[in-house]
Image (cartoon, helix red, strand yellow):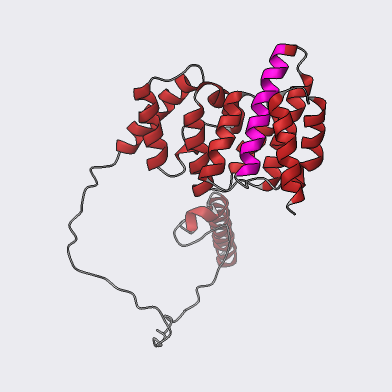
Amino acid sequence: DNNNNNNKNKNNNNNINQNSNNNNQNQNEGIKLSDLVSSEDFSFDSFQPIFCRPAPTLLKPTKDEFIWLNPDEDKDLLWDYSIGSDTEILLQARKILQFALQRKLSNEETTQLSNIIRTYDNIIFHIGLTPDKLSDLVTFNSDIAIDALTMLHKSSNHISEYLNVLTRTQMSLQSMEVVSKLTSAIQLPGSFLKSYINNCIQSCNNVEDSYTQKRLVRLVSVFLQSLIKNSIVDPKEVEVEVQSFCIEHTRIKEASTLFRLLKNEGSSY
């Protein structure tokens, strides 16, 4: 009897242990890893060890280094009351220039625009006077064109772009007046003068109307005489072209006078 009782007790204990093991297993299966470890203590991205880095040491300054200044002085700001005045003058000059490209300016407008061009350096580039507009300015307002080209010669190296326009456009009394006055104001390149003279001669030869041609020949002859007498053009450089021009129009008095002047200048060399 005692043996039977002991066996029963052992079986009961085994059943209890088995049930508790099953319960523990079920509980463990319901627990997740994220529940055991918080997000602050554990990261799924990486495991980066923390290295102890000592603070960098300061380098001793040398005499060759720049000295950093922290001025404590209070600076009083000075207001420039002239700011904006140039803009108003610029707009005014642009407006007058647009009129100058379309019609003859009044005396007041001419004086006003000339003073602005002579006073402010490089203003030609800011008022819209490009090389392709120079021919219109020469036609309607040659005095303004002379001032503009003179200032371009003094303040920049872009005058050659504007002078080339005169060698490509149709010769006129206004353009000869501009070139003639420029020769007394600045020193024009010899290559430009030669090209311009060739353009004048070619323009005379291309005119079909007899009356207009004679008029242009007289103007060109007087213009060339002025250049040669004032030693602005070397007769040797244009001798061939000018002689051919004079011989072709020998019946015109001014052309004959130019031919004799050219011969006299050539004999003096």
Q: Position of residue 257 (x, y in %)?
A: 70, 32
Q: Position of residue 73 (x, y in %)?
A: 18, 67
Q: Quadrant of residue 162?
A: top right
Q: Which residues are magenta?
A: 211-229
Question: Is 63 located above or below residue 198 in the figure?
Answer: below
Does the magenta segment cover residue 15?
no
Q: Position of residue 137 (x, y in %)?
A: 53, 25
Q: Answer yes or no: is residue 165 visible.
A: no
Q: Position of residue 145 (x, y in %)?
A: 51, 32
Q: Is residue 226 left or right of residue 143?
A: right
Number of numbered tags placed on the structure image? 0
Question: Is 11 located above or below residue 58 in the figure?
Answer: above
Q: Answer yes or no: is residue 117 visible.
A: yes
Q: Quadrant of the C terminus?
A: bottom right
- Of 61 and 128, the residue lying toward us: 128
Does the magenta segment cover residue 224?
yes
Q: Quadrant of residue 158?
A: top right
- Of 84 and 225, the residue lying toward us: 225
Query: What residue appears at the point 58 percent right and 62 percent down from the top-left corner?
Result: 46
- Of 154 and 266, the residue lying toward us: 266
* Type of secondary structure dominating the magenta stretch: helix
Question: Is 171 located above or below residue 16 in the figure?
Answer: above
Q: Is residue 180 left or right of residue 69?
A: right
Query: What residue appears at the point 48 percent right and 59 percent down from the top-left corner?
Result: 37
Query: What residue appears at the point 51 percent right and 44 percent down from the top-left corner?
Result: 185
